[in-house]
């Protein structure tokens, strides 16, 4: 039997991604996923077969959504390279602030997935998604850092690859420390301090 005509696959994926990004794969129950998507278990699994398949599809959509937003920001030639990095970090802090008001951290599907190596072993698609996201993210950050070196907003001796990895480490660290309950004001200060080694 086919899925109901009213089933909105994109909305369901966004809803379950919001659960996975906070709790990770292992700690997100089927009941949580069904409640988040607003559908019965049968409807969810008619559409996605299994929790594993649902996770892969949600991860694909999550990564694609963030890639689009990152690309738009980090290639915006109306902004200096340094401004692009500051706005990126401020966006992470703002997500965590908004999530904290709802009683939890924002989380990140990519960070959770990277911290759970068994997920990569379960399905090679997860490995491909994460590896491509890492390459894309590093490439975009390198481009922004290179632009900042040229416009003077980033130190001329800053190595683009090292700088890109630093920014990624800062973002991952902010996500993890937010899960531990660190408040947004302190997260913002940490992010600014971390960027100082790159900015002119």
Image (cartoon, rainbow, N blue to C red):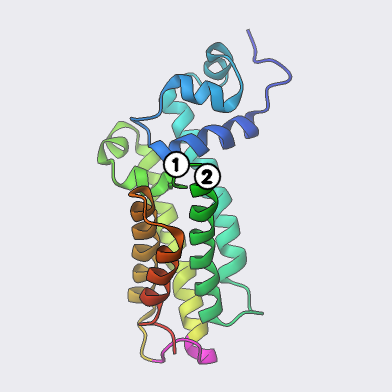
The secondary element bearing badge 1 is classed as helix
Does residue 63 lie above or below 92 as drawn?
Answer: above
Q: Whole-percent x and y of residue 155?
A: 41, 89
| Residue at mark 1 | 21
The secondary element bearing badge 2 is classed as helix
Query: Marks 1 and 2: CB-CB under 8 Å?
Result: yes
Does residue 30 lie above or below 76 as drawn?
Answer: above
Q: Whole-percent x and y of residue 146?
A: 47, 82
Q: Whole-percent x and y of residue 37?
A: 58, 26
Does residue 199 lie above or below 19 as drawn?
Answer: below
- Packing grade of label 2 (10 A; few <14, some 14-19, many >=20) is many
For this rendering, which residue is in front, 96 or 66?
96
72 left or right of 56 in image? right
Q: Is residue 67 magenta?
A: no
Residue ID at (32%, 75%): 162
| Residue at mark 2 | 62
Of the numbered discs in the image, which one, if any, rests on residue 106?
Answer: none
What residue range appears in magenta? 149-156
Which image quarter holds the N terminus?
Answer: top right
For this rendering, which residue is in front, 178 or 24?
178
Residue ID at (73%, 18%): 5
Q: Residue furthest right?
A: 5
Q: Whole-percent x and y of residue 194?
A: 36, 74
């Amino acid at each position: 039997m086919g899925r109901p005509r009213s089933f909105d696959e994109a909305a369901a994926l966004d809803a379950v991604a919001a659960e996975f990004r906070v709790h990770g794969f292992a700690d997100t129950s089927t009941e949580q996923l069904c409640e988040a998507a607003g559908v019965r278990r049968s409807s969810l699994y008619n559409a996605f077969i299994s929790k594993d398949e649902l996770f892969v599809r949600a991860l694909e959509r999550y990564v694609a959504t963030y890639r689009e937003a990152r690309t738009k920001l980090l290639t915006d030639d109306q902004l200096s390279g340094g401004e692009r990095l500051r706005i990126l970090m401020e966006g992470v802090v703002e997500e965590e602030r908004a999530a904290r008001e709802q009683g939890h951290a924002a989380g990140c599907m990519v960070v959770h997935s990277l911290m759970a190596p068994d997920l990569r072993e379960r399905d090679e698609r997860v490995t491909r998604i994460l590896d491509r996201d890492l390459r894309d993210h590093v490439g975009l950050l390198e481009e922004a850092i290179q632009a900042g070196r040229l416009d003077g907003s980033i130190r001329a001796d800053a190595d683009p690859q090292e700088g890109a990895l630093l920014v990624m480490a800062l973002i991952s660290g902010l996500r993890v420390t937010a899960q531990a309950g660190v408040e947004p004001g302190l997260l913002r200060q940490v992010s600014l301090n971390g960027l100082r080694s790159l900015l002119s």
